[in-house]
Amino acid sequence: MISVRRIPEIWHRFDVTVRDLPLGLLIFAGALIPSFQNHGTQLGGLPARPFDALAIVAVALQSLPLAVRRRWPVVCLALVSLGFAVDQLRGYHSFAGTAMPVALVSVASHLERHRRTTALVFSVMYLPLAVALHRLGSGAETPSEFAMYYLALALPWGMGAWLRSTRAMEADRRRRVAEATRAAERARIARELHDVVTHHVTAMVVQAEAARYLTAAPERLDQALTAVTETGRRATSDLRHLLDLINPDHGMDATAPTVGRLRTLVEQTRRSGQPVEFTEEGAPAGSTGSADLVAYRVVQEALTNALKYAHGSRTSVQVHHGESEITVEVSTDGSGSRATASPGGSGRGLAGLRERVDVLGGDFSAGARTNGGFVVRARIPAGSPS
């Protein structure tokens, strides 16, 4: 049995002509009801005439073409106008005359090209009809009344033009939103690539440089090369995870970087020759949304900068899990080599971190310490799926 909720979905699967036909059938049936006959639009003052076979043809011409009002709007308006002319010249004055405004709205709303030409042609065609009705009628209708009816028909045309304009603006808005979304997604992927590649490659370079001086100590050389290998494998794993995220059919990967993997990250940095003191307080909340990943990236970027610009400096990593936020602080004391270098390099990594934290409504700061070294701090609200 078909669910009531599925009826609109099933209905919209039908061709647009099928969906537009019921209105035409409704007007056709209504115009043939005896109590509705001779109670429609009356233009020109012609006396009412009883319905005959030609009246049914006029009613059909005015109502049934509404089925193609969106597919062939000009054809619809031409047939409706012909039926309306027969209706008025014969004096039927049927209820089917209400189809004329519907046809005008459809033409103005759905005609893709030559809308002004179409409006001009049908306006010119109205003139001989008005003249014929004036001559055949009782003479009670003045030219101003024909002009008023023409202006009345201009209203549904204006409504159709407004609908078309609104639809075009909405389509343009959706296009701009889609472009902005794609740009934001590209920027997010670029930030992820920067975080993953920069950290792991920096660690591998530092480890490889250290291995050059360990040829006289095979055991330490083997440890250094093993560390390079492990770092490369982690880089491959993280890049594979990132590429899976780009795939629209990806699922949530349990290997996604999280705060829970910080110890692994810290240990990797230690093997690269960076003395790191790690402190973690509190327990991660059950649902942290994106805060978990952002906190991981903050620590990762800060440790990468420590390896690049303060190699050998004592480094402190402090992570605190609160009920509604995660706070991170990574600092160096400036005691190692190149400790006076800029902690941010090009600044792209820190700028990306600031954007991530800002999106979640948190606070981020990074800069030099008064006693040397640098410090990175972040307060990241938890629970946001952004």
Image: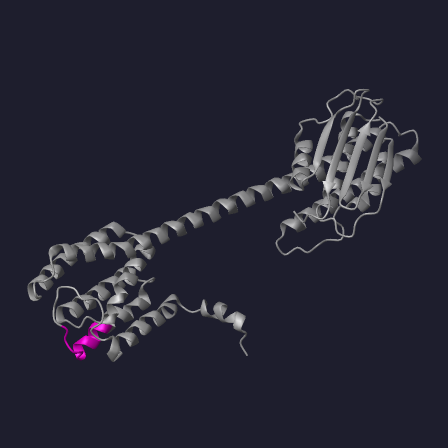
State the image coordinates of residue 373 (x, y, percent, origin top left).
Answer: 80, 23
Quick check: 299 left or right of 69? right
Residue 49 inside the magenta-drawn segment? yes
**On screen, 303 above or below 70?**
above
Residue beneath the point at 14% across and 54% down: 144
Quick check: 241 left or right of 113? right
Task: Give, as a single range, the part of the protein colored magenta.
Answer: 48-59
State the image coordinates of residue 5 (x, y, percent, origin top left).
Answer: 53, 70
State the image coordinates of residue 316 (x, y, percent, origin top left).
Answer: 84, 32
Nearer to the camera, 317 or 129: 129
Nearer to the camera, 250 or 26: 26
In which quadrant of the rendered image does the N terminus lie? bottom right
State the image coordinates of residue 349 (x, y, percent, origin top left).
Answer: 68, 33
Q: Is residue 285 in view?
A: yes
Residue beneath the point at 84% across and 42% down: 263
Residue beneath the point at 69% across and 32% down: 350
Nearer to the camera, 303 or 10: 10
Instruction: Give the quadrant of residue 238.
Output: top right
Nearer to the camera, 166 or 272: 166
| Count of number-bearing discs | 0
